[in-house]
Amino acid sequence: MKKIIIGENIVKSFGVGNEKQIVLDGVSVCINEGEFVSVMGPSGSGKSTLLYALSGMDSIDSGQVFFDGKDLSALSEKELSDLRRTKMGFIFQQPTFLKNLNILDNIILPSMRNKRKSAKEIIDKAKKLMKKVGIAGLEKRDFTQVSGGQLQRAEICRALMSDPKIIFGDEPTGALNSKSAQEIMDLISDINTEGTAVLLVTHDAKVAARTERIMFMLDGNIVSQLELQKFNGADLDGRIKKVTEKMQEIGI
């Protein structure tokens, strides 16, 4: 299976001098095309920093990150920006929407830089995605007029506008109630089933249990992994048990 992301000996630190703290300490990781992977670990273990490094959102001190065969460190800021906009999608715990734009305009904003598609094509696609995720009819509302679950669905639409090869999610269900969290995970699972790779950072065993591979981090390193079958909707409780047992074994 083709590897979409290869990270080799990634080192990332913050601060200088006596205040310097190594957050990623020589991490190596591979993500395959179409794979569904999660990263778990205590606060400060480096899991979100790893996601930002693998997506090119943050620079690294040393090591290499290859995305679809391209060395991210060799790309200009514009090339990195274009790569993230066209090949990657992002879902954050708190959606980063602009206050002065309605839901539809926030969804289409990054795609309007695509000169190969007309505004009508972009808007039509956004509306189809909104219908697909269950928020049709909310186009003209601003982000204060929708629920957290609806806002997260809108962010999923934005992430899918460019038909990305991978979706990165940083605690995408962390601010939602259990019902909304399950619905968002259903949507993310559907996206993966359709062939898009997914990499999620999560603290929730129930979320991680729906992925097929879990990487556990401690003190800036991947200390263990758990491989599961693709989730087919059955035996979630058994999968959660395996995740929690692994967490207890590691001590997280």
Image: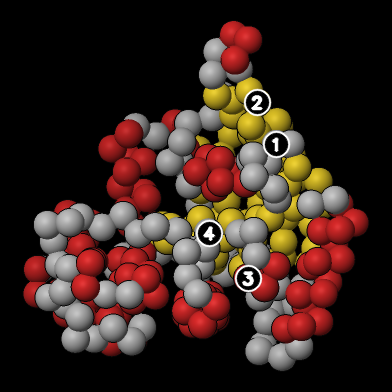
Q: CA distance from mark 1 to mark 2?
A: 7 Å
Q: Residues within 10 Å of mark 1 (few under 14, many from 20)?
A: many
> Closer to the camera, 239 or 151?
151
Q: Which mark is residue 220?
A: 1
Q: What amino acid is labelled 4 in the image?
A: Glu
> Closer to the camera, 194 or 48?
48
If you read the primary sequence from the N terminus, does the residue marked by circle 2 or circle 4 appear first? 2
If you read the primary sequence from the N terminus, does the residue marked by circle 3 or circle 2 appear first? 2
141 sits to left or right of 169? left
Q: Which residue is mark 2?
A: 22
Q: Which residue is mark 3?
A: 207
Residue that sits furthest to the bottom in the current view: 234
Image-quadrant location for residue 113: bottom left
15 sits to left or right of 227? left
The residue drawn where x is 54% and y is 29% is 60
Label 1: element kind:
loop
Q: Residues within 10 Å of mark 4 (few under 14, many from 20)?
A: some
If you read the primary sequence from the N terminus, does the residue marked by circle 1 or circle 3 appear first? 3
Report x, y in % for residue 195: 51, 75
Label 3: element kind:
helix
The residue drawn where x is 52% and y is 63% is 174
Q: Which residue is mark 4?
A: 171
Label 4: element kind:
loop
If you read the primary sequence from the N terminus, does the residue marked by circle 1 or circle 2 appear first? 2
Q: CA distance from mark 1 to mark 3?
A: 22 Å
Q: Is disc 1 in contact with disc 2, using a CB cutoff of under 8 Å? A: yes
Report x, y in % for residue 45: 68, 41
If you read the primary sequence from the N terminus, does the residue marked by circle 4 or circle 3 appear first? 4
Q: CA distance from mark 1 to mark 4?
A: 18 Å
Q: What amino acid is labelled 3 in the image?
A: Val
